[in-house]
Amino acid sequence: MPISWSPDGKWIAYVDALPGNQRGLFLLSVETLERRQIPHTAECLDDWLPAFSHSGKQLAYFCLHNPNGFINGLYTVGVSGGAPKLLTTVEGWWGPGAPAWTADDTKLVFSNPKYGSVGTASGLFEMALADGSLRKLPVNHNGYEPAISARGDKLAYVTTVSDGHMEIWRKELLNPQAAGVRLIPSTYEQNVPQYSPDGKHIAFESQRSGVREVWMSDADGTHLVQISSFKDPRTGVPHWSPDSQKIVFYSPQSGQGEAYIVDISERMPRKLVTNIHGIAFPSWSHDGKWIYFLSSGAQPGVYRCPVQGGDAILLVALPPGDLGQSPAESFDGATVYFTNVAFNAVLEMVSIKRPGTSSVVDGMPKVLNLHAWTVVEGGIYFVPADAPRSVRYFDFKTNEVRQILDMAKDFGHGLSVSQDGRWVLYSQMDEVNSNVMLVDRFR
């Protein structure tokens, strides 16, 4: 358990066991070995993560209120006595990390997953003790464990992916014995790689700028360029135009899901203007005239819209709560494939000439997730739901499935095969990584 030294070096704040399988905060004198307990409030199960103020007169700490909801209260208390004061509550399964005092002891900086951008992603927040006002700091959305320098002019914090992160790998399909290669290394998560049709570039999602954005590289993983800058962690899922000059992706940064098209030479995304809202997972038709997408709006379903914008056409309606995912057109332009759910998914298809009804792709096994398949001219490469470290191939003519490659670790999100059939890109889970970030001129 973390401890905290008083500024004069005479006291240590630490955690110790209490009766009833609880934990409390104690102060230990390093001169006399005197020990005294910080008052333990009734709503607290465990006190932890103490932090002395710079004056040494106050202690900030967290206490666990609800182990099922992972709710922690942020408190301050006078070191010389007095009742603890609850400032706010935070929520997150990994714990918030100890709070940090600003140099003048008027504010506390802490991480709070409850207020984070998405899911359990944490944000760093600053609270003014005088009035309880709260502001989110403009730093990485999954930052935690803040520390402020003694002068107060620098802020350091940690970012991590708790269950590992995903990296982009490449393997040569024409040489099955060759090992896979980590193509675009990063300590940040990277997903959904997509080869351009001309084989010269790769579009992908990356958190290397702090928040998930769309990026592009050369085919060998070099010359990385950031394509989007929406600062919304839900931005992503890029797909190429047939001429390899544009990318379509989606982002809800405007408040609802929208499709955006960007020319890779200009790098200025423009919104696809259509009559349908709640757009996700856009992709291009092979003739370059249409954008397919999923909508979770008033009429959920799979749609297509002219690439220049305008009214969208419903291809197949889907019941709310059971939405299709990641529509992709067949090479002959006659069929659109999509998964029926996000995980352990059945692949379905709908005819462009006979919209309205979808059918299951006969003989096709369930796929691991919505990004675990890609359509090529003769069939579908996919990661099966029951073998997350395997890539297989479904042949349209024979309905046969054959093994293509095995991965060293679990598959992540994203599968793409170069148009010449030589290379496969995939996302693979890697080890847990932490990054220490530094904000200069914090004050």
Image (cartoon, helix red, strand yellow):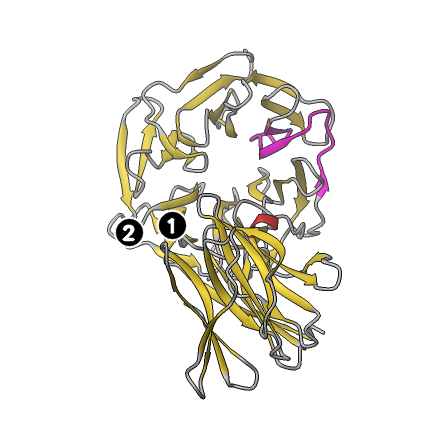
Q: For residue 376, which numbered disc appears in the image?
A: none
Badge 2 marks a residue whose secondary structure is loop
* Residue for point 62% across, 45% down: 245
**Image coords of residue 422 (percent x, y):** 37, 46
Region of the chain picked out in magenta, as a range:
270-294
Q: CA distance from mark 2 to mark 1?
A: 8 Å
Front residue of 48 and 363: 48
Image quadrant containing the C terminus: bottom right
Compare residues 15 and 169 and report the one nearer the observer. 15
The picture places residue 101, in percent across and down from the top left corner, at 63, 71
Camera-side residue of 387 and 296: 296
**Which amino acid is tagged 2?**
Ala
Res 428 label: 1
Position in image of residue 335 (x %, y %): 50, 21
Hey, what amino acid is under mark 1?
Answer: Gln
Q: Is residue 161 left or right of residue 293?
A: left
Q: Mark 2 — residue? A: 408
**Mark 2 / mark 1, whichever is N-terminal:** 2
Residue farthest toward the left in the current orientation of the protein: 177
- At 57% from the left edge and 16% from the top edge, which residue is drawn? 317
Q: Residues within 10 Å of mark 1 (few under 14, many from 20)?
A: many
Quarter where residue 21 is shown? bottom left
Instruction: Determine if the magenta segment contains residue 280.
Output: yes
Mark 2 and 1 residues: CB-CB less than 8 Å, in contact? yes
- Helix, strand, or loop for circle 1? strand
| Residue 73 place in picture, x, y as percent | 56, 55
- Extreme residue in the bottom direction: 31
